[in-house]
Amino acid sequence: MNGSAIKSDFIEPSSEGHVRRQRRKMQRVTMMDVAKRAGVSSSTVSLYLRRPEAVSPMAGQEIAQAIEALGYVPNLVAGGLAAAGSRVVSVIVPSIRNAFFAETVATLQTELAAEGLQVMLGHSEYSEEDEEALIRTALAWAPAAIVLTGLRHSKAARHLLASASVPVVEMWELGAQAPIDMAVGFCHTAVGATAARHFAQQGFTQLAFLGARLLQDSRAATRAEGFAVEALRLGLPEPQILNHPAPATAEAGAQLLGRVQASLPKLQAVACSNDLVALGVLFECQRRGIAVPGDLAVMGFGDLSFSSTSNPPLTTIRPSGDLIGREVARLIKACTKGNRPPGADRIVDTGHLLVERKSA
Amino acid sequence: MNGSAIKSDFIEPSSEGHVRRQRRKMQRVTMMDVAKRAGVSSSTVSLYLRRPEAVSPMAGQEIAQAIEALGYVPNLVAGGLAAAGSRVVSVIVPSIRNAFFAETVATLQTELAAEGLQVMLGHSEYSEEDEEALIRTALAWAPAAIVLTGLRHSKAARHLLASASVPVVEMWELGAQAPIDMAVGFCHTAVGATAARHFAQQGFTQLAFLGARLLQDSRAATRAEGFAVEALRLGLPEPQILNHPAPATAEAGAQLLGRVQASLPKLQAVACSNDLVALGVLFECQRRGIAVPGDLAVMGFGDLSFSSTSNPPLTTIRPSGDLIGREVARLIKACTKGNRPPGADRIVDTGHLLVERKSA
DNA sequence: GTCTGAAATCGTAGCGCTATTATTTTCAAA
DNA sequence: TTTGAAAATAATAGCGCTACGATTTCAGAC
């Protein structure tokens, strides 16, 4: 069309025939726009955003006004690239449907948000393979830290994490295995043992452990094992461990009680892998006219919100999911501020607490 | 200092005295490293990663091998900047501790992960102000979409969202108000009405609604209102609405039953804002020797996992949190693929379902 | 007046990748 | 062979920001 007409005032120096590239740019307001309007350079705007006290009050005010007027929202993607690291914390849990992890994630998110850190969430559905894929994606965001659940991960995942120099926190489990980097949690074997001892102290000898998804949920399996081992150590007959293949729900608990009643008529006490399972047991006992704790003592794990109100109120073990969240946040905040905790402080044992109520 | 001494073999064209800047670069493996090792240009690697079928099988194999050997993880931050948009979906819920939202977020996350989209999570704790701050941060990530809970947001938030050209999905609520962009959910007024009609059909006249945090949780408040309005419309006496200031738990339900029993001795039926509250009511009824549904009919909301197993099994209304998650994901996927649904399809009503069991 | 140092501000070079255009290679048809 | 189009690959210019060093400003000391 206008092949011959060339805009006269446009001289292209050292031209090699390059055409001005037309790139679909974001139509968003940039830092440069703010700078222009405030009558300063973009460096000053950037500085103001990161350390307002380093900019003169007058310039600061101009900039603040420009930001407000233009509705400027900084582009953290660009910032992350320039600063070689984003303000994202990747959190990978087995399932957010699980009230334990929901509690931890909620606390963690609140704590981290105060420091300007974002939580990116992933759930592995108890699959090591899925977890590895999630870790890979997480790493692609150059996160400030990665939070994983438990100490068991695929070999490739460990390798990936080790070679990336990112703070890693493993939570909700402490044990024989050394963490990749840092860990916040408690020993599940000890939890099982606490339950066993509590039953033993009350003179019960016929025990069972009712679990759900024990094959997938290695932490629940560890509690079951700790329970059985401690019972044996105390000279009791070996407790039977029952497993329900579906997720830990009240429904699973009710069914498990049915099964255990059929196979062990002399049963005196059951430890459950989860308060929801224990709740199901309580319901089923009511239906069958089994008195709790008279005929059967029932113990849960988790101290969920309903456990203090049930009939009878549930004796359970509290893992303090919120405390774990808080401690994980503390470690991450220390790392992002440059003072990585020394050796021993990189492992935090949040312990567990036996909450004695009426069911056992 | 070194004004006169110039390194002889270094000729700086059009020098203005610039010194070579030393910048702490990320020590991570870049696409360039992969390209070098595979003997191709970085463009080809980029192309291979996005459209493998566009590069020759031989080159593809070389690249794949190099990626494997070097343990290359693409930098999505850089990619997001270059492509002017990240593969992040920001999801903001009032509380992840709430089983409803946990269910939705979990489903959403699974669905979106299949498309290579990441979920970034935020929770507003039922505060419009916090939500606004979260939206601001979310926008800073140039997200592929933003998911909010409910239709009520601060004015500034609406403005922010409207001026950013990002797909926005509001979920868990449908009503008179038009959504900002898209919406997936159901009408809470209708839920309340369904509960009222169910009670009316059974001949109950003395009704009450037991809610928690009604001042913060506008959706629960809407259900309560819908319940009361429908009861009046059916010619029943106005139901009393009781509110508990703490979060919706079984404990709150138990306390509310105490209060309502004291003030309304002739009470026949209660609708609860949440299954957990209803569970607490059930527990308290057992303790007080109130037969359910004989002396008092109890209805919940949510159809949580324990509701089918309780004593008696809980009659409740199922909102289908997973369906909401699935539909939200569908809308977002359509948007990222460039085919934004037309007008009417941008609002999806997932409805609600009365689940009749034994408690009412 | 000049000098000095601290405070404030600015200019520039990337961060690692993608989009776009440019170039080379391939290969069937002429 | 030559040729032309299609396929494959390469070169280049940013994306919007931050880090770093350079430059300017402005008191107070001499």
Image: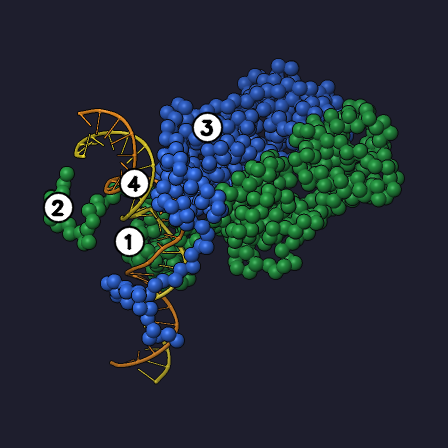
Chain colours: A blue, B green, C yellow, D orange
The quarter holding residue A293 reads top right
Image point (86%, 44%), residue name: B234
Q: Earlier in the sequence, mark 2 or mark 1?
A: 2
In the picture of the structure, the residue carrying the numbered disc 4 is B24
Residue B111 visible to an observer of this rendering: no
Q: Nearer the viewer, mark 1 or mark 4?
A: 4
Q: Nearer the viewer, mark 2 or mark 3?
A: 2
Where the N terminus of chain B falls, by quadrant? top left
Q: Nearer the viewer, mark 2 or mark 4?
A: 2
Callout 4 crowding tier (Cα within 10 Å): few <14, some 14–19, many ≥20: few
Q: Earlier in the sequence, mark 1 or mark 4?
A: 4
Chain letter of mark 3 equals: A
SS label for mark 1: helix
Q: Which label was assigned to residue B176?
A: none
In the picture of the structure, the residue carrying the numbered disc 3 is A330
Question: Which amino acid type is shown beneath numbered disc 2?
Answer: Ile
Q: B260 or D8, which is in the foreground?
A: B260
Image point (57%, 20%), residue name: A353
> Cα distance, mark 3 to mark 1?
41 Å
Judge left or right: residue B176 versus residue A160: right
SS label for mark 3: helix
Q: Which label was assigned to residue B6?
A: 2
SS label for mark 4: loop
Question: Which amino acid type is shown beneath numbered disc 1?
Answer: Lys
Residue A47 image offset from top left, x and y in percent: 37, 39
Q: Which label was assigned to residue B36?
A: 1
Judge left or right: residue D5 versus residue B293: left
